[in-house]
Amino acid sequence: MIDEPVEVRGKAVASSSAPVPGRAGRLFAGWSANLVQMVLGITQQVALIPVFLHYWTGDILAAWFAIYAIGNLAFIADAGLQFRAINRFLQFKSGIDSDGRTARFYGAMLRIYLGLVAALTLPLLLASALLAPSTAFGFASVAHFDAAFVVMAAGMLWTVPSNLVAALYRARGRYGRAVKVQNAAVLAGQFGQLAAIVTTGSLLAVALAYAAAQVVATIWLLTIDAPRLFPYLRTERVALSWRCIAGQFRKAVPFAVAGAADLALLNLPVLLVSAFVSDRVAVAQWGLTRVVAGLLRVLCVQTTLPLAAELGHDHAMGDTQRLQSLYARGSMLVTLLASVVVSGLLPFWPDFFALWTHGIVPYDPVLTVTLLLGTAAAAPSILALNYANYSNRGDLLVRAKGLQLVVFLILAAALTPSMGLIGAAIAVIASELLIQFGMLGRIILQKTLQHPLRHVCLLAAVMIGVTLAGWALGLVIRLTVPLAAPARFFAECALWLLFVAVAASPLAIESVRARLSAAIPH
């Protein structure tokens, strides 16, 4: 059986894999890889669009957006198995025969993953043959839409098994490696998309370039990279029963439900605003303002993921002291990062918004302030959420995210028809603060830190102080720079960054950082 109990107190056998860098090295490797991933994501969704529009009509671009969205939805097929695998790999590290148990579980899960995507590919192909996707999605006039749809959906579906390799890398201190391989695939895919659209202008060729690069990266990780890094993966084989397969899916259900609720909370606000608000310009305002709030949230998520992997390791090993220290410092880091970014966005976002939209969509200051301040206030709970995923708290995740979804739906239905965009923003922020921060974050803090109340009070003081100081600095700079747009905008941003860099320069001194870290309540 691949789910035998882990003997946490037993003496672990030395791992035969290559040595990994220390904690600081692992964290910086993860953050740098995640930063590149964010840049590539912005390039894919923003920078490539003008090139596409040069060769495509608006209808073909809309078709590409639909196909791209379908490719992203393919990752739902993971069904929570990745977090299930991460927690098992972490538990194996603290028991006897760590490598052997890891290899048996990895081999079993790989067969489950491959069987899952094979089982999902067949109905996808049959459904596409019986009901043309171009007809179902309203793109019958777009050439090769059906073929591009199948290539994207099936291709991205077959990248899902790479989640297993990523889970193993995260548990074994190589978080950044899987992300770097995926980044290389995305970059290659972007060059492929450019070559495809310039040479053929075909929607199918662009979809094929995007999906093929990531499928190749998955094959590389599964067949070459993982066995080379962890040779013991080649030595173990395990027989699978239907009962065992069903058990893995059953134990992954809490993570799958929590992930589905999080995905719904990300996309439902857009649909509800479209349904309740009749003014199409207001809907555009919502979508554009949600972009900046979404980027802030993604930045916080990417910052906390490497931290969560390290926290999960400490939790599995029972190293309470290191766990408390890292969680306290990580929570402060996320709070500082969110506060600094928001303090810079609030004064300068109006100028950027006008340049970005060419003045076609009016700026809504109340909506922007509500979404940005609310997202920053909830930033520490993102670390709690990711740590819950890495510490096998599936039941807590289901309760919290399910309740958050219910609270959001109730508030959105009550506030959006009467208050419009502000009502929708209040529903989003209130559900996140009340449930993700107030319930899930509170429980994680109480179970992790010795002084959770003092820690939260310090986070609140830091967030308020940094946000107000940076916002005030930006307003002063806006009043003193005499240039005209767009030069004014770039000069304002450069001056603000210069002042902030000078203010933060003492943090480069190790003794200062040490004293500040020691002052954070654990």
Image (tube, helix red, strand yellow):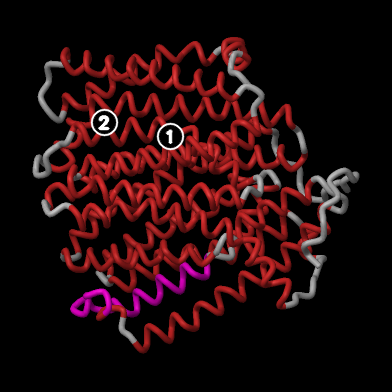
What is the secondary structure assignment of the residue under circle 1?
loop
Please state the horizontal and vertical placement of residue 112, each as a whole percent of the image.
65, 71
Please state the horizontal and vertical placement of residue 3, each as a whole percent of the image.
77, 62
Q: Quadrant of residue 427?
A: top left
Q: CA distance from mark 2 to mark 1?
A: 14 Å
Q: Residue furthest bottom?
A: 130
How many labels were placed on the picture?
Answer: 2
**Vertical arrangement, residue 376 with respect to residue 291, above or below:** above
Q: Which residue is mark 1?
A: 378
Q: Which residues are magenta?
A: 136-159
- Of 468 and 62, the residue lying toward us: 468
Task: State the mark number for residue 349.
Answer: none
**Vertical arrangement, residue 276 with respect to residue 517, above or below:** below
Q: Earlier in the sequence, mark 2 or mark 1?
A: 2
Mark 2: amino acid: Val
Q: 275 left or right of 374? A: left
Q: 403 left or right of 409? A: right
**Vertical arrangement, residue 451 with respect to residue 72, above or below:** above
**Vertical arrangement, residue 384 with respect to residue 51, above or below:** above
Q: Which residue is mark 2?
A: 369
